[in-house]
Amino acid sequence: MATKPLDNETIEKIISSIFLPQDVRNALLIELNTGLRIMDIAKLKFSQIQFGILELVEQKTKKTQITKINMDLVRYLNTNKTWSGDYMFLEAKRKRNGIEYCAPKSFVRYVQNKLKIVCECEHINHEFISTHSFRKTFATNAFNQTKDLVFVQKLLNHSSVSITQRYINVDQERIDNFREKIKMGF
């Protein structure tokens, strides 16, 4: 079964866990508050979020995304830097022949591993939890607030509404809500 969005209690337990390294906390907070994919987050530089404007080319879709992000998040990230370079995440930075480059796959594995450890330490069932759960949580919250699939599609940079619909499982939610409330003939 696929990953699921997280409830507020689970988010709080994970984010506030003493077992969660600060760099992983930063990455998960970015994902939770922007809906970006973890692979794109792994490559982020502080210079890309100047004045609350984020500009990047998504690795999966190759689409350019220029968007505002919450200034509280920007301040939090600047206050809680885990090192002094331009790349946000040291684990994603490598050098080859004296030239810095980004190795996001190793950072993604690192974050996944730390997330699993935190879930185990905090007694959270992690069977359906991964870094992608934070993106799904962002999408689900956006839909619950707006009830607008096209809006959520644009937020996530999905190519079609049907992808977004499957992504946040909106059909099942509507079916469950309808069946739960239907009362006929008695």
Image (tube, grey):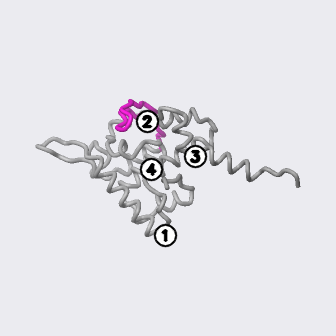
Q: Earlier in the sequence, mark 2 or mark 4?
A: 2
50 on left or right of 150: left
Position above or below: 121 against 76: below
Residue for badge 2: 52
Secondary structure at badge 2 equals helix
Q: Residues within 10 Å of mark 1 (few under 14, many from 20)?
A: few
Work out whether mark 2 precedes mark 1 in sequence or the reverse, and give the earlier one.
Answer: 2
Instruction: Name the disc covering residue 132, or none.
Output: 4
The residue lying toward the viewer, choosing from 105 and 2, is 2
Kindly identify the residue that appears in the image at 42 percent across and 33 percent down: 53
Most distant residue in the right direction: 186
**Measured Cα–Cα span from mark 2 to mark 3:** 30 Å
Q: Which residues are magenta?
A: 54-72
Q: CA distance from mark 2 to mark 4?
A: 23 Å
Name the residue type under label 1: His
C-beta proximity under 8 Å, tags 3 and 1: no
Q: Does the magenta segment cover residue 84?
A: no
Give the total number of marks visible in the rendering. Answer: 4
Q: Position of residue 186 (x, y in %)?
A: 88, 55
Residue 169, label in figure: 3
Amino acid type at mark 4: His
Instruction: Tell me the number on the disc at residue 41.
Output: none
Other-residue count near label 3 (Cα within 10 Å), few / some / many at <14 / 14–19 / ≥20: some
**Mark toward the viewer: 2 or 1:** 1
Q: Position of residue 44 (x, y in %)?
A: 33, 41
Residue 56 showing in the rendered view: no
Q: Residue at x 38, y 51 (%)?
A: 80
Q: Amino acid at mark 3?
A: Asn
* Residue 42 vs residue 130, the one in the foreground: 130
- Name the residue that disc number 1 marks: 123
